[in-house]
Image: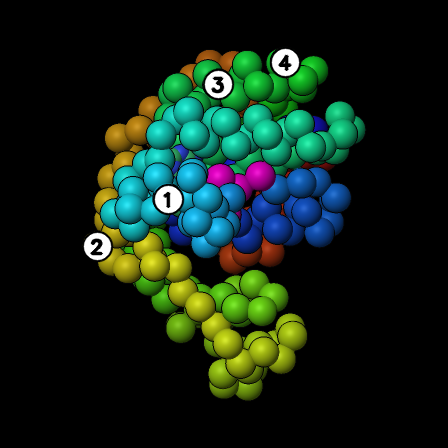
């Protein structure tokens, strides 16, 4: 099974992808995570992407489609894939079709997380993760049980994404509206889109996605 999780920044794509990985043994391909790793490692791709990411703009289609192709080549054919944060433009959607068909894969569903944009800014600017294990927290919605200590691994080091500030978030939303939302009708025409209420609590969203995959 190959699915795309689609929705604006902060819609919960990463959270839901992690859940599908844990529950179904699928693999999450997050271009955002891959690009952040490339920036951290100061690879040529990372050096090119850093400033664009910090501004909230989109990295070039060729770069992201290139890294998705490389990641797909690492997987065996039976492993299901969740595309998280990719494709984000019509050119990427077209590239993905080619990457999948060249590997004998095809798309099963595009799950669109529908969300209220105003709520997203609050979600995003408050979010942070454990620097050790990656567990997710939020200043308002999900504090650790013991202040300053990760519930999962006990670490006391946390981090925030540099692009999770209000100004950059507004740019990321505008990019989503201008370049990513227009690809939804293309998938709709192929009967692949399933809508999910992304404002529901994360367990309800997870259950809705599970319902789609098991239909
Ligand atoms: P994300 O973690 O998905 O929110 O992505 C963080 C940032 O990485 C985005 O704001 C973009 O600058 C860049 N990025 C991630 N995925 C893509 C993509 N598919 N196309 C272009 N830029 C991307």
**C-alpha distance separating marks 1 and 3:** 23 Å
Q: What is the C-alpha distance between the residues marked 2 and 1? A: 22 Å
- Mark before the other along the chain sequence, 3 or 2: 3
Q: Is mark 3 within 8 Å of ligand 1?
A: no
The image quadrant that residue 48 belongs to is: top left
Magenta: main secondary structure: helix
Q: Which mark is residue 47?
A: 1
Q: Quadrant of ligand 1?
A: top left
**x, y percent for residue 82:** 60, 37
- Does the residue at mark 2 contact the one at mark 1 (Cβ under 8 Å)? no
Dot 2 falls on a residue whose secondary structure is helix
Of the numbered discs in the image, which one, if any, rests on residue 167? Answer: 2
- Expressed as whole percent of the image width and height from the top left, the position of residue 192 reads 55, 22
Sequence-wise, the earlier of marks 4 and 2 is: 4
Asked if the residue at tag 4 contacts the one at tag 1, i.e. Cβ–Cβ closer than 8 Å, the answer is: no
Spot occupied by residue 116 in the image (x, y as percentages of width and height)? 34, 48
In the image, 49 versus 204, the foreground residue is 49
Residue 41 counted in the magenta span: no
Q: Quadrant of the C terminus?
A: top right
Q: Magenta segment, which residues?
A: 29-33
**Crowding at mark 3 (Cα within 10 Å: few <14, some 14-19, many 20+):** some
Query: Which residue in the structure is indicated by mark 4?
Result: 102
Give the Cα distance between marks 3 and 2: 30 Å
Tell me the tag on residue 95. 3
Indicate whether 20 appears above or below 175.
below
Q: Upstream in the sequence, badge 3 or badge 4?
A: 3
Q: Nearer the viewer, residue 201 or 139?
A: 139
**Residue at image x 69%, y 32%?**
74
C-beta proximity under 8 Å, tags 3 and 2:
no
x and y, in percent, of residue 186 in the image: 43, 17
* Horizontal relation, residue 201 to residue 152: left or right: left
Task: Provide the secondary structure element on which disc 1 rests.
Answer: helix
């Amino acid at each position: 099974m190959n699915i795309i999780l689609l929705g604006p920044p902060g819609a919960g794509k990463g959270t839901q992808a992690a859940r599908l990985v844990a529950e179904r043994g699928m693999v999450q391909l997050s271009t955002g995570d891959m690009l952040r790793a490339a920036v951290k490692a100061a690879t040529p791709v990372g050096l090119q992407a850093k400033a664009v990411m910090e501004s909230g703009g989109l990295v070039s289609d060729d770069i992201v489609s290139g890294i998705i192709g490389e990641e797909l080549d690492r997987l065996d054919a039976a492993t299901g894939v969740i595309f998280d944060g990719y494709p984000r433009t019509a050119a990427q959607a077209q590239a993905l079709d080619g990457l999948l068909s060249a590997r004998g894969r095809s798309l099963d569903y595009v799950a669109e997380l529908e969300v209220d944009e105003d709520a997203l800014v609050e979600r995003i600017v408050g979010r942070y993760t454990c620097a050790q294990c990656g567990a997710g927290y939020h200043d308002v919605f999900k504090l650790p049980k013991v202040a300053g200590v990760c519930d999962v691994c006990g670490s006391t080091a946390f981090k925030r994404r540099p692009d999770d500030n209000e100004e950059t978030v507004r740019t990321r939303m505008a990019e989503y509206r201008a370049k990513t939302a227009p690809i939804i009708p293309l998938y709709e025409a192929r009967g692949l889109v399933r809508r999910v209420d992304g404002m529901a609590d994360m367990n309800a969203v997870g259950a809705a996605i599970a319902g789609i995959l098991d239909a």
